[in-house]
Image (spheres, rainbow, N blue to C red):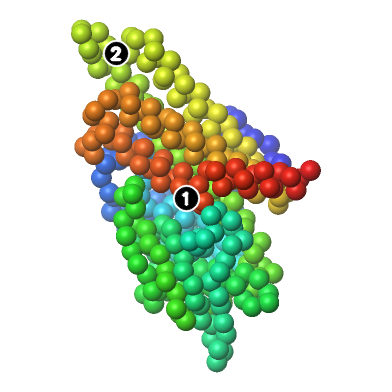
């Protein structure tokens, strides 16, 4: 287990400050222009902050990546940061490291397509089949819950190779049988309906499975870091609101019951932040089973905390919190979408119990 840096270094502080200044110019209610935001993030070095220098990064680690994720979460960035710069980059770092630099420079945008309708958060559940015919590979199956489909230039698809296990394949976005939609929290989503679809083999099971499971553990923890940022911003909006909103000539923030609610929200956020730090330490230096167990625990705890914090933020705002014109409701939508991903919080609790049993 890697040591947990509870106090940010000078470099990390400057990274957070730069992201916070940029985020202060954004309106969470408005969708960003993906190409502009993504290239700006690449030019600022934010996409490469947590990657090793030999991969084209700045020599940072997952704690640096979490700072970027958290600040992007504060402003509800709709671009698939965790999906591309974390998950896809980590995956390719293990099987095709020469391709990672293009992602970090904003020149490539591959997205992992792994989840399936019956998987319920089980990373090893893959029913999509891969078959070789005439020297080329073809995939048949269905991939759901893919975030970033509208921005992807290719999809990294997991599929079973008969008698071997889970392999990893690539399908260009232009050739992918893709159904796109806008998610509940206003992100670009979609699903792949693969039907004898041509694909390129990237890695056979011996390499692909370890790389895939590691990338999925990173997804659980770094998406949780994004949610920490969203929770913090929702709290700040709520605190400022109750300190200025008046009823009967008195600020509602003077009522003790409401102050207790704000305190409860703060406690939930700080507990969630602590478990994210614990999860990051497991990613940085934990054993395989320990890393997976902690990733599941992080997702489960942060999902419940986010629903509590963002739900209370709406309640404390009253009717205005339910409107699309006011930003606080958008944080709850992101929390709700986050809680349902990867099988949901309840499934991650089950996985933690299963994996913790294996540790004993």
Q: Earlier in the sequence, mark 2 or mark 1?
A: 2
Residue 180, position as x, y percentages in the image = 33, 64
Residue at 41% over, 54% down: 80
**Label 2 CA crowd tier, 10 Å (few <14, some 14–19, many 20+):** some
Element type where label 2 sits in the image: helix
Residue at 45% over, 74% down: 194
144 is higher (above) or lower (below) than 78? below
151 is higher (above) or lower (below) than 359? below
Q: Quadrant of residue 119?
A: bottom right
- Depth check: give the residue in front, 253 or 119: 119
* Residue 324 seen: yes
Residue at numbered disc 2:
252
Residue at 49% over, 29% down: 269
Q: Quadrant of residue 162?
A: bottom right
Q: Residue furthest front?
A: 118
240 is higher (above) or lower (below) than 303? above
Looking at the rendered image, the quarter that the N terminus falls into is top right
Cα distance, mark 2 to mark 1? 36 Å
- Depth check: give the residue in front, 46 or 147: 147
* Residue 215 seen: no
Q: Is residue 1 left or right of residue 316?
A: right
Residue 181, position as x, y percentages in the image = 32, 60
- Depth check: give the residue in front, 48 or 180: 180
Residue 100, position as x, y percentages in the image = 53, 62
Q: Residue furthest top?
A: 249
Residue at 34% over, 10% down: 255
Q: Quadrant of residue 280?
A: top right
Element type where label 1 sits in the image: helix
Q: Is residue 349 left or right of residue 155?
A: right
Residue 151, position as x, y percentages in the image = 36, 62
Residue at numbered disc 1:
341
């Amino acid at each position: 287990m890697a040591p947990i840096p509870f106090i940010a270094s000078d470099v990390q502080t400057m990274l957070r400050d730069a992201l916070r200044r940029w985020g202060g110019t954004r309106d969470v209610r408005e969708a960003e222009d993906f190409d502009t935001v993504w290239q700006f993030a690449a030019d600022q070095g934010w996409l490469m902050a947590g990657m090793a220098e030999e991969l084209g990064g700045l020599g940072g680690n997952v704690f640096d990546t979490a700072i970027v994720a958290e600040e992007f979460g504060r402003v509800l960035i709709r671009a698939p940061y965790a999906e591309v710069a974390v998950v896809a980059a980590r995956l390719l770092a293990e099987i095709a490291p020469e391709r990672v630099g293009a992602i970090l420079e904003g020149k490539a945008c591959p997205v992992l397509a792994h989840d399936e309708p019956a998987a319920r958060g089980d990373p090893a559940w893959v029913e999509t089949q891969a078959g070789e015919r005439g020297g080329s590979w073809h995939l048949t199956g269905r991939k759901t819950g893919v975030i970033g489909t509208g921005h992807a230039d290719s999809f990294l698809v997991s599929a079973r190779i008969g008698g071997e296990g889970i392999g990893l394949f690539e399908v260009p976005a232009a050739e992918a049988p893709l159904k796109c939609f806008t998610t509940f929290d206003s992100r670009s989503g979609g699903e792949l309906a693969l039907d004898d679809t041509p694909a390129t083999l990237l890695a056979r099971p011996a390499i692909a499975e370890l790389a895939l499971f590691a990338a999925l553990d990173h997804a659980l923890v770094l998406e949780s870091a994004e949610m920490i940022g969203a929770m913090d911003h929702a709290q700040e909006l709520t605190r400022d609101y109750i300190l200025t909103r008046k009823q009967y000539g008195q600020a509602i923030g003077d009522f003790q019951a409401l102050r207790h609610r704000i305190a409860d929200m703060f406690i939930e956020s700080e507990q969630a932040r602590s478990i994210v730090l614990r999860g990051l330490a497991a990613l940085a230096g934990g054993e395989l089973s320990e890393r997976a167990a902690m990733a599941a625990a992080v997702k489960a705890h942060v999902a419940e905390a986010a629903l509590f914090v963002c739900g209370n933020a709406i309640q404390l705002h009253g009717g205005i919190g339910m409107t699309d014109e006011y930003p606080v409701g958008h944080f709850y939508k992101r929390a709700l979408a986050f809680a349902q991903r990867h099988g949901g919080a309840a499934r991650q609790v089950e996985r933690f119990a299963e994996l913790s049993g294996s540790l004993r």
